[in-house]
């Protein structure tokens, strides 16, 4: 029976597919770490209280990248090149979602509007990350090899999502509500397209590595298109709502470490 659990178990059991999965994940997390680090360094004077939280967000992302690399090392595997069509983070940037890397490479202070753009982008992408890790936690939280990593990363992604809700609500109260809602909608509609395209590309690569029959690949592709259709009609709305989270000041402390996975 084809299910999310059986699909990921198949990827987990094969060295080549597991290396590709971890390499894609590590690359995206490391890129997110760099982006957050640069944003933290460029926060405007009136928002300096936000800088440590953004830095913590970046440190978490860096930690996740190290965890995925450590999981490969534990199996004696090396990271593999990430196919460009599977690079979720870079494809979002190329579609104009979030702050452009050219802007982040320049030592020029950001504006509050830039922070709205950053937080809206993060709120949308962290929704996706939180949901994906929740799925993995449901099936693999007790797995002897990846369970601890799944639990740690899932906890962090939930913290990131809570932080985005809280900070966007704060900025909405400060008079940026309309800009926030407009930016959230733009980000969500672009993200679901990129996620569809990346999902199709990843499944194509996995199918070739694992020797999936054409019918199985076609069924998975149909499922990905069905998810996109739902998200295009209504599902994107879950990415733009804002509510005060139960976890307050979720990024108010220091980041954990990835040393236990080394």
Image: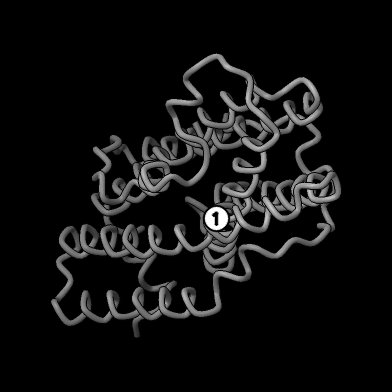
x, y (%) of residue 206?
24, 60
At 55% from the left and 69% from the top, the residue drawn is: 236
Q: Closer to the camera, 60 or 40? A: 40
Residue 222 visible here? yes
Q: Where on the picture, by quarter, is residue 142?
A: bottom right
At 21% from the left and 57% from the top, the residue drawn is: 205
Secondary structure category for the residue under label 1: helix
Q: Is residue 120 above or below residue 30?
A: below
Which residue is outermost to the top? 107
At 60% from the left and 43% from the top, the residue drawn is: 117
Q: Closer to the camera, 214 or 15? A: 214
Residue named by callout 1: 129
Q: Is residue 257 above or below residue 64?
A: above
Q: Where on the picture, by quarter, is residue 131?
A: bottom right
Q: Closer to the camera, 133 or 101? A: 101
Q: Which color scheme did the rendering employ for the protein?
A: one colour
x, y (%) of residue 91?
36, 47
In this rendering, position of residue 198 left or right of residue 152: left
x, y (%) of residue 45?
77, 20
Quadrant occupied by the N terminus: bottom left
In this rendering, position of residue 114 left or right of residue 245: left
Residue 141 visible here? no
Crowd around label 1: few <14 · some 14–19 · many ≥20 (10 Å): many
Total numbered circles: 1
Q: Where on the picture, by quarter, is residue 260?
A: top right
Q: Is residue 236 above or below residue 123?
A: below
């Amino acid at each position: 029976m084809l299910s999310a659990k059986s699909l990921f178990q198949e990827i987990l059991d094969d060295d080549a597919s597991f290396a590709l999965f971890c390499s894609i994940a590590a690359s995206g997390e490391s890129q997110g770490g760099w982006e957050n680090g640069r944003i933290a360094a460029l926060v405007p004077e009136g928002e300096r209280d936000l800088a440590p939280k953004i830095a913590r967000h970046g440190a978490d992302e860096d930690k996740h990248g190290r965890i995925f690399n450590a999981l490969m090392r534990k199996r004696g595997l090396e990271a593999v090149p990430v196919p460009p069509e599977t690079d979720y983070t870079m494809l979002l940037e190329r579609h104009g979602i979030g702050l452009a890397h050219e802007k982040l490479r320049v030592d020029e202070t950001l504006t509050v509007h830039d922070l709205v753009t950053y937080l809206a982008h993060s709120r949308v992408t962290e929704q996706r990350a939180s949901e994906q890790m929740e799925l993995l936690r449901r099936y693999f939280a007790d797995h002897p090899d990846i369970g601890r990593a799944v639990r740690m990363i899932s906890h962090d992604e939930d913290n990131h999502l809570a932080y985005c809700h809280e900070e966007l609500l704060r900025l909405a109260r400060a008079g940026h509500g309309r800009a926030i809602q407009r930016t959230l909608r733009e980000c969500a509609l672009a993200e679901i397209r990129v996620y569809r395209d990346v999902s199709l590309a990843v499944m194509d690569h996995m199918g070739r590595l694992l020797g999936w029959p054409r019918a199985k690949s076609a069924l998975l592709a149909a499922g990905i298109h069905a998810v996109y259709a739902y998200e295009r009609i209504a599902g994107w709305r879950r990415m733009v709502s804002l509510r005060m989270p139960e976890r307050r000041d979720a990024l108010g402390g220091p980041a954990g470490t990835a040393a236990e996975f080394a």
